[in-house]
């Protein structure tokens, strides 16, 4: 009798776990140029607390193709529907990588959103992006440390932005001249955050891109690093995307 109860309990647990797993939604987070995935920690924690499976891509920043491939690699490890999120240059990466079949929605967090055939340089000519570069040799750059805080993340502590600047990964200038293939947002719903105090990607450029794609857009009064300075609001937009594709 005792063994029968154990078997019945196991069967019930399996029946309850089954639908939850089937409906599970994955979130994959992609960082921007010269950065790494650690800045997503607060958003990661919020989403995990909601029971979501969250993965963070570490872009190699060796080329646009390599960054897209690194994102595809993580996407192919997901089981079930996935919401793909990109910040800044990471938005350009998810535009290409988002063609993976398990990606059901895209979220652009103060992010670039190119169309097929475009380059990032072409986008910037519409509303010039403010990127103070420090050239590092081998045609690579990092943000200029002298203007890092004020330009990129004025609403974060200077002690943090000083560390972010000191740990910047040199980025190939060539990524700005690379042509994109098919834009995933043409086939899949997209959501977007406009950081209204953004000095890197002008809000006018963000609005133009997101209007073109038909993205559902939210404004947040923030610097370019909105997912770090406003993690709760950023996570709320990601959850909105998740709920829209369930």
Image: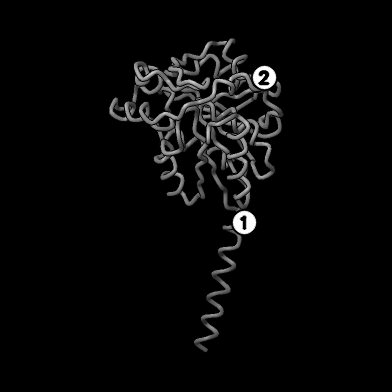
Q: Residue 146's quadrant in the figure?
A: top left
Q: Is residue 159 left or right of residue 203?
A: left
CA separation in Å, label 2 and label 1: 37 Å
Question: Which x, y percent locates residue 165?
Answer: 37, 26
Q: Earlier in the sequence, mark 2 or mark 1?
A: 1
Q: Is residue 239 left or right of residue 75?
A: left
Task: Give the secondary structure at mark 1.
Answer: helix
Residue under the image location 29 percent in, 25 percent down: 158
Disc 2 crowd rating (10 Å Cα; few below 14, some 14-19, many 20+) is some
* Location of residue 26 with respect to 124 vertically, above or below: below
Q: Which residue is mark 1?
A: 22
Frontmost residue, 74 versus 209: 74
Q: How many marks?
A: 2
Question: Which x, y percent locates residue 81?
Answer: 62, 47
Task: Give the secondary structure at mark 2.
Answer: loop
Q: Which residue is mark 2?
A: 118
Q: Residue furthest front?
A: 138
Q: Residue 224's quadrant in the figure?
A: top left
User: Tag on residue 204?
Assistant: none
Frontmost residue, 145 versus 139: 139
């Amino acid at each position: 009798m005792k063994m029968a109860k154990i078997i019945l309990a196991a069967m019930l647990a399996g029946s309850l776990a089954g639908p939850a797993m089937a409906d599970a939604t994955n979130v994959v987070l992609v960082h921007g140029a010269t950065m790494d995935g650690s800045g997503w920690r607060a958003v990661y924690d919020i989403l995990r607390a909601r029971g979501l499976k969250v993965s963070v891509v570490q872009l190699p920043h060796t080329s646009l193709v390599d960054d897209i491939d690194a994102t595809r690699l993580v996407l192919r490890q997901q089981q079930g529907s996935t919401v793909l999120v990109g910040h800044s240059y990471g938005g350009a990466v998810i535009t290409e990588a988002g063609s993976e079949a398990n990606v059901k929605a895209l979220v652009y967090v103060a992010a670039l959103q190119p169309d097929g055939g475009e380059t990032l340089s072409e986008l910037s000519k519409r509303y010039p992006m403010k990127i103070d570069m420090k050239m590092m040799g081998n045609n690579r750059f990092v943000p200029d440390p002298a203007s890092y805080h004020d330009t990129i993340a004025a609403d974060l502590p200077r002690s943090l932005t000083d560390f972010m600047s000191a740990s910047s990964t040199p980025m190939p200038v060539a990524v700005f001249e690379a042509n994109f293939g098919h834009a995933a947002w043409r086939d899949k719903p997209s959501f977007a955050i406009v950081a209204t105090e953004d000095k890197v990607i002008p809000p006018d450029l963000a609005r133009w891109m997101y209007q073109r794609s038909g993205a559902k857009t939210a404004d947040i009064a923030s610097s370019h690093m909105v997912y770090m300075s406003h993690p709760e609001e950023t996570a709320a937009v990601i959850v909105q995307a998740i709920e829209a594709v369930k």
